[in-house]
Image (spheres, grey):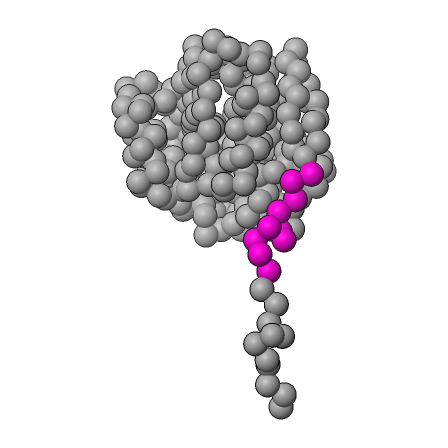
Amino acid sequence: MESVEENDIVCLDESFFINDNYQLTRFTFGSQVLELYCLQSASTDFDLTGQMVWPGAELLNDYLSKNSDILQGCSVIELGSGVGVTGILCSRFCREVVMTDHNDEVLKILTRNIVLDDSSKNTICSAEKLEWGNSEQLNDILQRHPDGFDLVLGADICFQQANVPLLFRTVKQLLHVGLKKKCRFILAYVSRAKVMDDMVVGEASRHGLRITEVAGTRAEIRNLGGVIYEMTCA
């Protein structure tokens, strides 16, 4: 058997996986027109899914644009913001929007898009690093927002089974801190596997959250079934 020579080993730098060929793209939700940079197809690295706009974000933005009264004057934190299409829409109505993501490369384009959007100068917008289940990062955010938030948002953020319990652990803490504000979690969920469908509902219940389907929100988007869930502390 031939031995593997050291010089034969190929080490790929992380930049090999990064596609930063962003295109300025226009999105319209109701009367709101957004322009932001994003990819038109997914990166080669699963961890960089946030570089493009996913169906669940379109579902959530359509819902929020039709029900913008729930955003008026609110403070919002979004989990898994990606390029920021939902957070930036919220900034048209909210008092403050904190957009979070765990990936440094995604945070770069998210920050770029926040700076690009100049239609909501009266809203405080920021991009923060937050890995679900990371208590230190979450506590850093909550130190700056000791009363919590009015709304927690998430769009198409349930991909990996291992991350779902961490997601709901983070959501539970955010809802608990914002209990006096009657904070709620609005999740735009897109069904891709029955096991994930069951897991989302199961983990919400296991973490002591009351989960309800928002009436009239079931829809087909890009040939996938989607729905809006609303969750509160039970």
Image-based side of 205 in relation to 109, left or right? left
Q: Residue furthest front?
A: 7
Question: Which range of residues does the magenta coloring cover?
Answer: 12-21
Mark yes or no: residue 13 visible: yes
Estimate the x, y position of residue 53 in percent, counting from the top left: 63, 33
Q: Residue at x 58, y 18 (%)?
A: 117
Estimate the x, y position of residue 135 in percent, counting from the top left: 31, 41
Q: Residue furthest bottom?
A: 1
Rendered-image quadrant of the N terminus: bottom right
The answer to which quarter of the image holds residue 166 is: top left
Q: Residue at x 58, y 11 (%)?
A: 119
Tell me: residue 64, above or below residue 12.
above
Rendered-image quadrant of the C terminus: top left
Mark yes or no: residue 229 visible: no
Q: Is residue 13 magenta?
A: yes
Image-based side of 85 in relation to 205, left or right? right
Q: Residue at x 51, y 16 (%)?
A: 91
Main secondary structure found in the magenta portion: loop
Q: Is residue 47 magenta?
A: no
Estimate the x, y position of residue 187 in percent, counting from the top left: 50, 31
